[in-house]
């Protein structure tokens, strides 16, 4: 049984638990999908990809583009508390892996120099 803080009763969209990438940022980064923008809109969505763009403390700009949600997975994102993106296996409900089976996933992360727009980020997922 896979769970998350949210499935154990924690409020505030704390559905993390799965493949997690913690980024660095001098200030809160931007997060977006093809149709959504901002932490509140993106956190918990099941859009095919999510991008995070920001500036490292040393000043260099970056964009991270994530794809690879499995059935029932959601994106967990944080920008204000800390920058991170997670393929959340149990965002709102626990996920069960039956005995003698396994869970497989294939995730893609594109790491790009500079702050890309949503059209360029979308093109990188194809």
Image: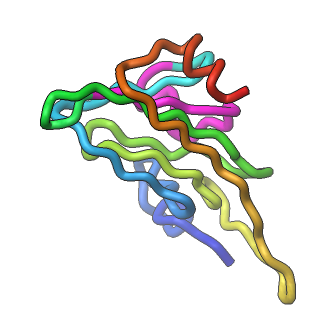
Is 105 drawn above or below residue 58 in the view shown? below
Q: Quadrant of the N terminus?
A: bottom right
Q: How is the image coloured?
A: rainbow
Tell me residue 72's x, y (percent). Answer: 75, 51
Q: Quadrant of the C terminus?
A: top right
Q: Determine if the magenta segment contains residue 5.
A: no
Residue range highlighted in magenta: 37-54
Q: What number of labels is visible? A: 0
- Whether residue 69 sits left or right of residue 24 in the image: it is right
- Whether residue 123 sits left or right of residue 11 in the image: it is right
Residue pictured at 53% horizontal, 37% vertical: 110
Pick out the residue farthest to the left: 58
Residue pictured at 37% horizontal, 42% vertical: 78
- Residue toward you, 20 or 113: 113
- Whether residue 80 sits left or right of residue 92 in the image: it is left
Pick out the residue farthest to the bottom: 100
Indicate the quadrant where residue 92 lies. Answer: bottom right
Tell me residue 84's x, y (percent). Answer: 38, 46
Is 23 drawn above or below residue 2 in the view shown? above
Tell me residue 53's x, y (percent). Answer: 37, 27
Is 51 drawn above or below residue 69 in the view shown? above
- Residue toward you, 41 or 125: 125
Residue pictured at 76% horizontal, 70% vertical: 103
- Residue toward you, 104 or 1: 104
Tell me residue 54's x, y (percent). Answer: 30, 28
- Whether residue 73 sits left or right of residue 51 in the image: it is right
């Amino acid at each position: 049984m896979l769970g998350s803080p949210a499935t154990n009763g924690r409020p505030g969209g704390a559905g993390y638990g799965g493949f997690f990438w913690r980024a660095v940022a001098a200030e809160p980064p931007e997060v977006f999908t093809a149709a959504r923008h901002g932490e509140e809109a993106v956190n918990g969505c099941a859009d095919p990809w999510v991008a995070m763009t920001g500036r490292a403390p040393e000043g260099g700009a970056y964009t991270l583009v994530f794809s690879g949600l499995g059935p029932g997975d959601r994106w967990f994102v944080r920008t204000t508390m800390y920058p991170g993106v997670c393929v959340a296996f149990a965002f709102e409900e626990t996920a069960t892996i039956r005995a003698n089976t396994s869970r497989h996933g294939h995730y893609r992360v594109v790491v790009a120099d500079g702050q890309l727009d949503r059209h360029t980020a979308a093109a990188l997922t194809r």
